[in-house]
Image (cartoon, helix red, strand yellow):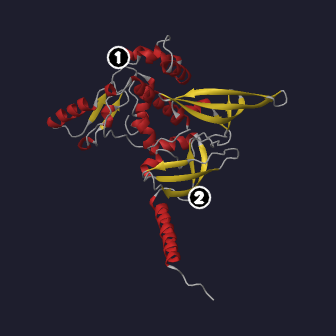
Amino acid sequence: EPLQATLFDYLKEKEEVELNEKEDSLSDEFVVKEGDTVYFNHEEYKVREISKNQITGRNDLWLEPARQGNHQIPIVAFIDNEDLLRQINLERPEFIIGDEVKYKGKDCTITRFDDMGNNLKTVTVKDNTEYLGGMITGTDVIPYYKESELGKIFENLTNAKPEKTFEEIEIKKNEAHNFKITEETLPQKLSPSERLNNNLEAISMLNRVESGERELDITAQEVLAKYVGWGGLSEVFDESREGQWKEARAFLKDNLSQAEYEVARESTLTSFYTPKTVIDGIYKTLSGMGFKQGNILEPSMGVGNFIGNLPDEMSKSKFYGVELDSVSGRIGKLLYPESD
């Protein structure tokens, strides 16, 4: 004889249906869903579940490790998609834990990443060569500031990228357009550390684009546009300064020629780029004088701020830029490939 459903059974079933519908709506609301691959703290994970935390009111992203040997099951708390994307990556970072890399001529494995604070991070690699029958293995802890630096430190054997031909690189550069400066972060409002990091990241991006490791797109141009030169950053060239300044010196010596390094060192008292407010004022004066289009020469262009701030009504003008500093000039070429 069939059992008669009680009110309790009905309410329980209704609650389960509502819960399932709520979970389905959560999956539709966010940029990830169950089963997706994401990257968190340089580790690959699968999304196991997205749920609402009834205590905190936030959302919880439950992750399952993809790498054998990783036994962590992180729960990422977040408010919305923007908050979530600040904590996870949807695309694979260039380097993750478990990658086989070439470091100083040795085959190694990345075993961990650590954030030391003050923008300083470290990556630990294990030498794959075993000594005394595997009883001894070597490890190295390498400091870095920006993710882009890792490509200069390691060759990734696990996630190797196919080399692009010279023709492919040139085609990509030809597809790029002049960068438009829509807003400006005044260098004087940035701390020396922030200006230093912006410069180092721009130089790293410059080398990657020129070598074909990175496509020239708007994201790359945004990094390049943050280069502010070495005015007011004499500390980086002071051999007695330690910490981030010492690390930056080592980076510059590895990524600049001797001549470029000397030019940068000598420019600490003279390398100051024209701010947007001054440039806008000059263009306003030219407009008031009736100038609409023509040939414009910038005899000391830096990275090309005058080109990047060119008003729309003068966009048909032909721009010519001259810059003696190699690094600034090369950055300017990538920011404004449609100018001469």
2 vs 192, left or right, is right
Q: Residue 279 is drawn in which quadrant?
A: top left
Q: Outermost residue, right direction?
A: 133
Residue that badge 1 annotates: 270
Amino acid, disc 2: Gly
Q: Nearer the viewer, residue 266 or 151?
A: 151
Image location of residue 197, percent across then percent down: 45, 28
Q: Quadrant of the N terminus?
A: bottom right
Please give the name of the residue rendered at 51% of the width and 75% of the height, measured from the top-left corner: 8
Please give the name of the residue rendered at 41% of the width and 15% of the height, measured from the top-left corner: 234
Q: Quadrant of the C terminus?
A: top left
Q: Name above or below for residue 153 compared with residue 250.
A: below
Q: Secondary structure at mark 2?
A: loop
* Marks 2/1: CA–CA distance: 55 Å
Residue that badge 2 annotates: 35
Residue 91 visible, this orientation: no
Amino acid, disc 1: Thr
N-terminal label among 2 and 1: 2
